[in-house]
Amino acid sequence: MAAPWSGVWERNRFTESRPAFRATIESPYTRGAVTGIGVITALAGLVELAGVIASRSRSRPDLPPNESPKTHAG
């Protein structure tokens, strides 16, 4: 994985083997698009994780304050 703002992005096999794509890959617009997609993907993952955590907390039975889920014989 290479971040568009790192030096790895400019020096990689893809740009070395296909010089015609170098200008497109090094374009600030391409870098911005890749960064934007990465941010959207990360946010979507966080939203999904929050949904999983929320559904797990809703499905647990109400426990007394001093009892943990492992010791509850429900």
Image (cartoon, rainbow, N blue to C red):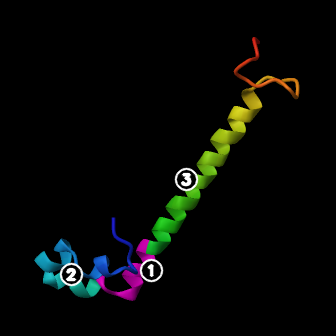
What amino acid is found at the position of numbered circle 2 in the picture?
Phe
What secondary structure is marked by label 1?
helix
Q: Provide the residue designation for mark 1.
A: 32
| Identity of the residue furthest to the left in this view | 17
Dot 3: within a 10 Å radius of its alpha carbon, few (fewer than 14), some, or many (20 or more) residues?
few
Please tell me whether residue 54 is drawn above or below residue 58 in the rendered image: below
Q: Where is residue 39 in the image (x, y as percent from the top left)?
A: 52, 67
Please tell me whether residue 49 is drawn above or below residue 73 in the rendered image: below
Q: Provide the residue designation for mark 3.
A: 45
Q: Nearer the viewer, residue 50 or 24?
A: 50
Residue at point 75% right, 26% down?
60
State which quarter of the image contains the C terminus.
Answer: top right
- Tag 2–tag 1 contact (CB < 8 Å): no
User: Could you tell which of marks 2 and 1 lies nearer the N-terminus?
Assistant: 2
Q: Is residue 32 shown in magenta?
A: yes
For residue 22, what is the image quadrant? bottom left
Q: Provide the residue designation for mark 2.
A: 21
Residue at point 66% right, 47% down?
50
What amino acid is found at the position of numbered circle 3 in the picture?
Gly
Dot 1: within a 10 Å radius of its alpha carbon, few (fewer than 14), some, or many (20 or more) residues?
few
Residue at point 76% right, 32% down?
58
What secondary structure is marked by label 3?
helix
Magenta part of the protein: which range? 25-34
